[in-house]
Amino acid sequence: AGAVVGDNYYYGRNVGEDDTGKIYYVSGLGQVNATFHTDTNFVVRGSLFDDKILDFAPLTEPDGEDKLIDDGVSRSYLIGIGGEFEVFVARIGTDGAPESYAVLDGTTVDWGDATEVLTGEFGAAFGYQSLDGETNDLKFADNEGAGLFQLQLPLTIPASCWNDDDATSTHEACDGSQATLKWVGLSEKAESNDGMNCPYQEKPTAMPTTASPTKEPED
């Protein structure tokens, strides 16, 4: 799992596989010598969600506003999906280091006309944020082919939901905080894949139209 936020790269390997998962980061990507940080503020309790967090979608609240993750502060976040559609959120501190995490396990899945499944493996996370900060789109693809899911924002995560230390036995999922995932498209089966993020970009251009080919030249 990995994602870029600003000039930092955040990564974790099989976060949630056990109770020793950590998220590390590299700062100064645009510099000649980047800095690798091996110290961490918390350890992830893997039993709070099913399977593993295989990829992160980054999310940054624009202009110092607290409107995408309602938690009383304006920050950047790393978001992934667990095997039973739990929503994992890691909050990045003002110093650039991941400072705490929360797990929302009461997820509602809007399947639309798609075929429902009970579990998934979400190996590809996609984040798009528009230049004006008005569009904030997070999507997650299931490796087993169940589909592409969009996380509905905002999320409300009270202060009591954040876990910020190494004492994993005391870590809990967020009680009473809800999340919604909406099925928005198909996904192919994949043994190994990855997503991408496009922070603060112009809106995608429409698909161009071209004339249909003909057997002979036309006037």
Image (tube, grey):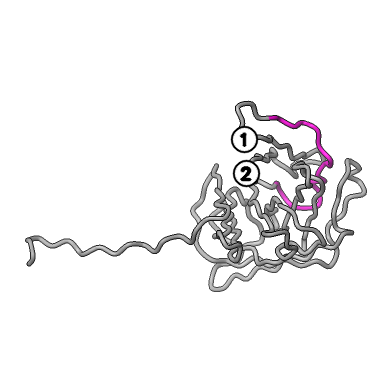
Q: Main secondary structure of the magenta part?
A: loop
* Residue 200, position as x, y percentages in the image: 57, 55
- Residue at x 82%, y 62% (from the top left corner): 72
Which residue is farthest front? 63
- Please state, as top left, top right, bottom left or bottom right, where the N terminus lies in the image: top right
Q: Earlier in the sequence, mark 2 or mark 1?
A: 2
Residue 29's disc is: 1
Is 36 covered by the magenta stretch? yes
- Residue at x 56%, y 50% (from the top left corner): 197
- Magenta stretch in the rendered image: 35-52
* Residue 174, position as x, y percentages in the image: 83, 60
Q: Amino acid at mark 1?
A: Leu
Q: Which residue is mark 2?
A: 4
- In the image, taking residue 27 as reference, residue 173 lies left or right, namely right
- Residue at x 32%, y 62% (from the top left corner): 208
Mark 1 and mark 2 in contact (Cβ < 8 Å)? yes
Q: Amino acid at mark 2?
A: Val
- Please state, as top left, top right, bottom left or bottom right, where the C terminus lies in the image: bottom left
